[in-house]
Image (cartoon, rainbow, N blue to C red):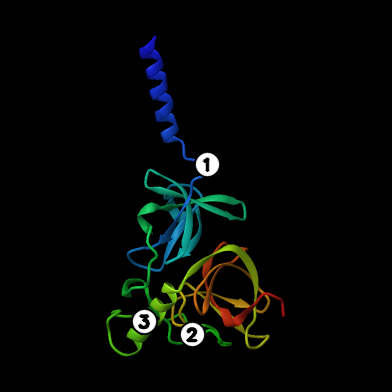
Amino acid sequence: MKKRILSLALIAVLAMMLIPCAHASWTMYVSPAKGTTVNLRSTPAIVKGDKNVITKIPYGTALTVKYVSNGWACIDYGVGSYDEAYMMVKYLTYDYVAPTAANMTVNKNNADTSSKPASSSTSKSSSSSGSGDAATRFARMNEQFRSFRRIPNSFTVYVKPERATGWVNFRYAPDEKAELVRQVRLNEQLIVIGETARWYQAQDPNTGIIGYVSRFYVSTNPN
């Protein structure tokens, strides 16, 4: 009888270990070895044609992980119809990440006050320890990343370009030369989830895409 009770107790303990805790969660950061984004998927699997890809999450983005199973992290997403989403845990790290040459792209034709169409041509910078303009950009971006903090209570901001017919660049990292995610127009809404000294980390409420926007070109009130 005692053996049976011990066996049942052991089974119960093992079962509890296999069930993810509903209330436990922790923060991890997107950190691909190469490139600037990682696929966020609706199911924990790589599907042919990437048909289960919800969006692409930029390098450096903080995500709330609910649990990890079979190499996949379950993300507390809460955008649209997706309460949860999945990312391969090998692309996540516990430590906040700063840009390196491997994931920094430069688009010389883009500026955050631009009213001209963005150029599609980009070029890789060669080294974070290089001289001149490249070294300055890395130092500036790393400074912004070091000043980053999560905002516990997110809030809505409205895009405020210099001209009503213009736009503001929404970028993957807090730097004027970082890769462009997309351009946002006057009074478009973004949900602020983090901040640096000069940038907001924000999420597009319609697509779930996360990026950075200059704090100077947004307002808490519509224009």
Residue depth check, mark 1 versus mark 2: number of the one nearer the observer: 1
Q: Secondary structure at mark 1?
A: loop
- Dot label at residue 222: none
Q: What is the three-letter code of the residue carrying label 3?
A: Ala
Residue matched to label 2: 110
Neighbours of disc 2 within 10 Å: few (<14), some (14-19), many (20+): many
- Say which label, 3 or 1, has the lower sequence index: 1
Q: Secondary structure at mark 2?
A: loop
The residue lying at 63 percent from left, 88 percent from top is 162
| Near-viewer residue (118 or 81) | 81
Question: On the rendered image, what quadrant is the C terminus found in?
Answer: bottom right
| Near-viewer residue (41 or 59) | 59
- Direction from residue 156 to residue 135 in the image, left or right: left
- Return the residue found at the far front: 2
Q: What is the three-letter code of the residue carrying label 2?
A: Asn
Residue matched to label 1: 22
The residue lying at 39 percent from left, 76 percent from top is 142
Q: Are marks 2 and 3 in contact (CB under 8 Å)?
A: no
Residue matched to label 3: 139
The residue lying at 32 percent from left, 90 percent from top is 132
Q: Secondary structure at mark 3?
A: helix
Q: What is the three-letter code of the residue carrying label 1?
A: Ala
